Image (cartoon, rainbow, N blue to C red):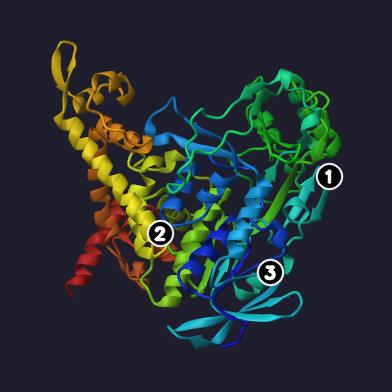
Amino acid sequence: MSQNHYDIIIIGAGHAGIEAALASARLGCRTAIFTINLDALGNMPCNPSIGGSSKGHIVREIDALGGEMALAADETAIQCRVLNLGKGPAVHSLRAQVDRRAYADTMKFRLENQANLDLKQAEIVSIRRGDNLSPGDMHTWHITTRTNTHYTCACLILATGTFLRARIHIGEHNHEGGPDGMPASTELSKALEALGIPLRRFKTGTPARVNRRSIDFSLTQMQPGDIEAEPFSFATEESPRQLTACYLTYTTEETKRVIQANLHRSPMYSGNIEGIGARYCPSIEDKVVRFAEKERHSLFIEPCGLRTNEMYLQGVSSSLPEEVQLAFLRTIPGLENVEVMRLAYAIEYDCVDPLTLRATLEFRDFPGLFGAGQLNGSSGYEEAAAQGLIAGISAAHKVLGRPPFTLKRSEAYIGILIDDLVTKGCDEPYRMMTSRAEYRLLLRHDTADRRLMPCGYQLGLISRARYDAYLEKQRLIEAEKQRVAGTKIMWEGKKVPIAELLRRPRLSYAVLEPHDSERPELPRDVILNVETDIKYEGYLKRQEAQVREMNRLEDVTLPHDFDYNSIAALRIEARQKLSNARPETLGQASRISGVNPADVQVLMIALGRKCFT
């Protein structure tokens, strides 16, 4: 076999590409990952943080399945906080500021030391599908670099981020280019179009980076990390260190005035940008227009690392001209004398319609070709990494002849993310939110190991040692549940089971501690699991019943060649939508826009008839 032939090749070494490469290599496939610049591997061009609302859940799930993002975030974290603590446990979510250069270096070192994995700095300019079939009835994929070197593989994963035909916009100026001064990947866009893959334009943006020395922090509010920080990874034994602080300030009426006076110079409003932007991550121009009644908008000042003075201004992404950016920033308390190090910009890029993908992230019409990350229309590091992990597992399983691996909506936020993309599609950059989850209480971030680590172990991505530690944790949880159910303590003059007291809204494990002399020493995460499971037992049972009902539909598979047009009782819209989307299960079919419950019932009857003929 040629040295230039691999089982799996990944194009792109961002967060999606990293997880895809590590997963496929760890599953025993000879893997190569290509990137335009190895120094940009694992780069964080948007913001220097990992996690956040719902995104922290995804990072925990990546870890439970054997991915790398959580471990790298814990190693390079400089401040950690659990968000939404004032709300219910279903939406508690970890967020960490990380040292962006340390994070990238950590990930690069991981890949350099991974068996079965080769790192290559090269721009891919051509992709074609070979006529010959490799073992397992798969086409061989051919790629060519800018220097005219050829490589082949059984499976190819596209994890190109925002680089495809990328264009940077700053005011009236625009030029071809990728994030952080990197070159765009234009020839690869043309190669995908030549292959027959339709592309569309999306847009995202980022705020300015400023010099710490030019900020007056006395006019801002310090935002410290949690006193007792939680790690992302279930394998991390020590709490991440709190090494720095973030700061909060607000825009002013003068900020709004400056922006409104220059809206005509924003490419979003002048018509220079064709791409569709993210609804849930608007630029400061969008905020001023869409929320004109608001007197101010929050701005978080966040460090990019420990060995740099660059500070990230979360909440004021922009594509206004340079002089306008400086003018409106200097109307904000604490930033009156600010010096900009990197300008804010908007970036347009090519991506695909995720409705062309299967739940394994393989292109329906191109066997052996997979997509992951922002190529699929999503936004965010965490969403990208999750897709990369699934794409890497899926490609490896295809090469190794193993059955497909997918996650249900009731099992993981990752399952929701991918199901939303491949069944509902997206007309704008997709962002995960807890509100997208039907079973939020079951999908708490503290239960990610309980839900997914057995899967990670069975896949071969979780070690025996990690799995044994997981089993011991579950043993402790169950033992403590039994103890508090069978142990009574004096409360308000009578003996009451501890479990019954824990169900009361104002009582907690901590409050009951002085009255519980037999309580064993237990890890904090064990206590959290026990208390939440008991306190919300009724709700959890209700959601589990809903999951069982939904799984009845998820377990009914639909043939890929099913002729929906032959079912006269189906509405015309449903026939069209089903024929286009080609859902793999009845559950997927039920979630397609334009398919209603009556259509699902018709399908069930049609499938029943087909089974008996």
The secondary element bearing badge 1 is classed as loop
Residue name at image x 30 percent, y 51 percent: 471
Q: Which mark is nearer the camera, 3 or 1?
A: 3
Q: Is there CB contact under 8 Å for labels 3 and 1?
A: no
Is 353 on the left or on the right of 317, as rendered? left
Q: Position of residue 598 (x, y in %)?
A: 28, 52
Q: Earlier in the sequence, mark 1 or mark 2?
A: 1
- Would you name the residue on which mark 2 appears? 462
- Would you name the residue on which mark 1 appears? 172
Q: Which mark is nearer the camera, 3 or 2?
A: 2
Mark identifier at residue 188: 3
The secondary element bearing badge 3 is classed as helix
Is 512 on the left or on the right of 165, as rendered? left
Number of other residues with Cα within 10 Å of mark 2, as a class: few under 14, some 14 to 19, many 20 or more: some
Is 327 on the left or on the right of 256, as rendered? right
The secondary element bearing badge 2 is classed as loop
Asked whether 607 or 493 is in front, the reply is: 493
Q: Position of residue 410 (x, y in %)?
A: 33, 49
Asked whether 408 or 321 is in front, the reply is: 408
Q: Measured along the vertical axis of the image, is residue 41 above or below residue 238?
A: below
The quarter of the image holding the C terminus is bottom left
Q: Which mark is nearer the camera, 1 or 2?
A: 2
CA–CA distance in space, label 3 to label 2? 35 Å
Is 558 on the left or on the right of 62, as rendered? left
The answer to whether any part of residue 568 appears in the image is yes
Residue name at image x 69 percent, y 21 percent: 220
